[in-house]
Amino acid sequence: MLKTGHSVTRPGRRLGDKPVNIPVPEELETAPGIVQNPQEVDFYSREYPLESQAVEYTADREWAWTVYTTEDWEDRRINDAMSRPIVQAAHNTGDIEPTVEPDFGKDVTELIRAKAREMGFGEVGFTRYDRRYVYKFKRDWSKFPNAICLAYEQDFEPTQSAPSREAEGPHYAIYRIMGALALDLADYIRSLGYHAQVHNPLSNSAVMIPMFDEAGLGQLGANGQLLSPHFGSRARLMMITPDAEVAYDEPVDYGIHAFCNICQVCVNRCPARALMRDKVWWRGAEKHKLIYRRCRPVMTRYEGCAVCMKTCPIQRYGMESVMSHYASTGQVLGKGTHLLEGYNLRDMGYFGPGELPRFASDFFHVPHGKAEDVLFEDLKEKIKNEAIPEGPEGDQMLRDFVGEVHKFVIVNPAEMVSLPSGTEVEEA
Ligand code: SF4
Ligand code: SF4
């Protein structure tokens, strides 16, 4: 039996459930929240500010629509249309006035927490809305100083079949449910006398995981996802920023930073070999960095993939069971079993522990970056090869080029809906 360093007590999974007690062995203790160098985080946010994937990777997104299966394409089109009104409603929430005068001096933190739990959010925490993680295109949009971090549990059963349409479907629905609940919660905050801005994850304003870490709702795993105490990486994330004065929660050391070094199940099971075995320092934080260029081709072609979510023992068994098992046996619960590690890839069959698919090298050759940059490169090639003739035909080609570029550079943030795939990885 390993010596317990400290224990973490968290509220039960659902409202009314008994609290859980997570033992963290002494050998897994590192630091609460994120291991980071704050000066470096400051430096990178100032000199190299973050930008949303929806802005930076438009070429990949255009490409993705050309390779989805017919069913996936249709699922996405329908879900995109259904989500759009909720995202647009969230976009305008910062301008809505409170309905009463606030009772200054009254701490509303626990009222909001209780309301959010009653609505079905599995984890609720409070912290500063950390502007170092805000995307450039949302800097002026984001108004208020505090963040309410909200995690909603994605259904257990369908997730275990990832990658599949059965696993991919429910998570779209969860974004709509969460989106609607957050609008209601913001109304409630206004009824207490405060403004409340809803940050819908489909048109996100910031990298959220560092703030969830800071609010004590979990820690970043090697799979690039928040590992929350009850449902690990099945946590779907949403934020509301109010101007109410709230009491901040504290970051917690759940032992994940060290545990992932030992576990490595997601790293071993990733079909794209996109997860790194060792941590690196990245923008001032020590973390496992996902190789996006390898993940994207698999995630796009295989129903959002999410193998790294599905094979994580913490999403399957919960943090209390995983840590207790490790403390008493020194082993990772479920590691090496077909139940935890096995998965099917459409048209390729079943891959059990130790088995990985092989892809042709051109499988990973996909466009990357901004769509307008790809168009400019294409134009440069044509100019170099003298493929733009003098006269009306050449003029038309140039007009077509301007039209194409226009599509990508004039973007209304209220219109931006970015349906994430099964896996929601941290982009910071
Ligand atoms: S979603 Fe990406 S990182 Fe995760 S297992 Fe699939 S390919 Fe790997
Ligand atoms: S599978 Fe293991 S290594 Fe990967 S995130 Fe989960 S606990 Fe960490």
Image (spheres, helix red, strand yellow):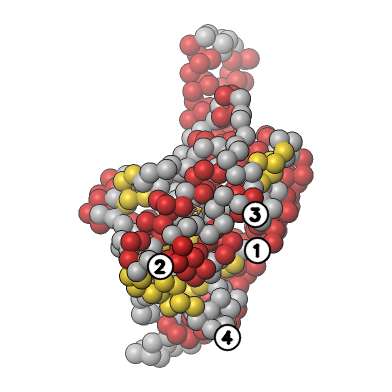
Residue drawn at 64 percent across, 43 percent down: 352
What is the spatial separation of the Cα atoms under label 2 and label 1, in whole angstroms? 30 Å
Mark nearer the N terminus (4 vs 3):
4
Q: Residue at x 49, y 45 (%)?
A: 267
- Depth check, mark 3 against mark 1: the one in front is 3
Q: Which residue is mark 3?
A: 339
| Residue 132 pos. (x, y %) | 33, 56
Mark number displayed over residue 156 = 1
Q: Are marks 2 and 1 in contact (CB under 8 Å)?
A: no
Using the image, tell me which numbered label, if any, was put on residue 1.
2
Which callout, 2 or 3, points at the residue further toward the start of the chain?
A: 2
Q: Give the CA separation, mark 1 to mark 4.
A: 20 Å
* x and y, in percent, of residue 106 in the image: 38, 90
1 and 4 marks in contact (CB < 8 Å): no
Say which of 418 and 319 sits in front.
Answer: 319
Indicate the secondary structure of the residue bearing disc 3. Answer: helix
- Ligand 2 is within 8 Å of the C-beta of the residue at disc 2: no
Give above or below for 263 relative to 400.
Answer: below
